[in-house]
Amino acid sequence: MTPIATPFGRHSTAAEVVEGIDLSGKRAIVTGAASGIGIETARALALTGAEVTLAVRNTDAGAQTATDIIATTGNQNIHVARLDLSDRNSIATFIAAWDEPLHILVNNAGVMALPEQHTLEGWEMQFATNYLGHFALALGLHDALVADGAARIVSVSSSGHLISPVVFDDIHFGFRPYDPLLAYGQSKTANILFAVGATARWFRDGITVNALMPGAIATNLQRHIGNVMSQVSLELRKTPEQGAATSVLLATSPLLEGISGRYFEDCNEGTIVTNGNGYMSGVAPYALNPDNADRLWEESLRLLA
């Protein structure tokens, strides 16, 4: 397959990516849209005229974000709904309340390098929040996505996936000593495998799914790992507006029509790498492996059963 290349790059902004794109009459959901790149992803989608729902844990912060987006874009169709991706009841409530066709689902919310925590079900918290909650959300919204006829799911991953594959025999650290970065890495690998697995199952339904690395952006996401951005060269750092660009490209660009199951960074398809290369760029073969994707899909269904 020829890697997908676009006119955009590392320093493109989300607003530049959506310039000239009209999604009036379309509906989008952005998880984690009250902070970091989620805000700028939602803002850029609002610029297209789409109706955007901010799916957030903190609805007060979500309401403030919605007010700001309405003021800066003039789009009045911005909504806020509560969603806690680590809480199955919260996910079920969100899904039950959604009764319209859905064009775009941006699985953006995430946590990073948490101290060891588990959900009530015993699931490791980063895996549960970053991946499994989004899996359950997409599964529950499948009919709404099919109804659109050409829906897109965007799965926000990270170069952190290069730290670890999904360790299927011990996903929840029942046997291994807990390591917050390994847990983060495997959750982000799972985000990519979701794109591969969903493509195999849902492409014929008119749903395309791609994963991405936003880039090195200073946000609240890194609060558990200190000033990690000081280790990143100025050339590689991005603003939140730049960090949201690849998500928005996958969600809206005509250049990505019919493209699915791939991994992007800096607004272009990432190259396959054979080692961690400093955990900064490229995609690991294990994250695109269809057998791994199938195994993860079946394990996810088992956990949610």
Image (spheres, rainbow, N blue to C red):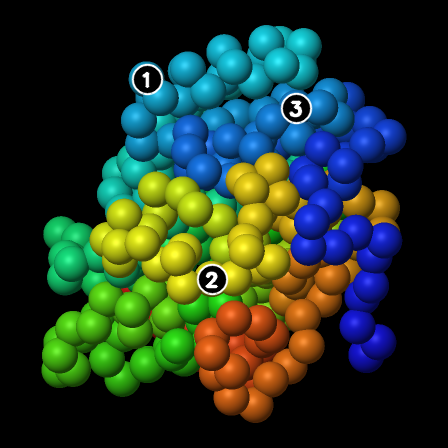
Q: Is residue 94 above or below residue 253?
A: above
- Element marked by disc 1: helix
* 184 vs 153: above or below: below
Q: How much space separates mark 1 and mark 3, taking CA atoms?
A: 19 Å
Query: Is residue 101 visible in the rendered structure shown here?
Result: no
Residue 111 x/y as whole percent: 32, 51
Task: Return the residue found at the far bottom.
Answer: 274
Q: Work out which quarter of the rendered image holds the C terminus and state it.
A: bottom left
Say left or right for 107 vs 93: right
Q: Mark 1 against mark 2, which lies toward the viewer? A: 2
Q: Earlier in the sequence, mark 1 or mark 2?
A: 1
Crowding at mark 3 (Cα within 10 Å: few <14, some 14-19, many 20+): many
Label 2 sits on a secondary structure element that is: loop
Identified by mark 1, the residue type is Asp
**Residue visible at 50% across and 37% down in the picture:** 38
Label 1 vs 3, first from the N-terminus: 3
Q: Quarter of the image holding residue 62? A: top left
The disc placed on residue 46 is 3
User: Front-most of 75 and 258?
Assistant: 75
| Disc 1 target residue | 60
Q: Residue at x 54, y 40 (%)?
A: 240
Helix or strand or loop: what does disc 3 sit on? helix
Amino acid type shown at disc 2: Val
- Answer with mark 3 or mark 2, whichever residue precedes in sequence: 3
Q: What x and y, as percent, mark residue 252?
A: 74, 41
Number of residues whose C-alpha sits closer than 10 Å to that of mark 2, classed few (under 14), some (14–19) or many (20 or more)? few
Occupied quadrant, residue 116: bottom left
Q: Which residue is mark 2?
A: 232
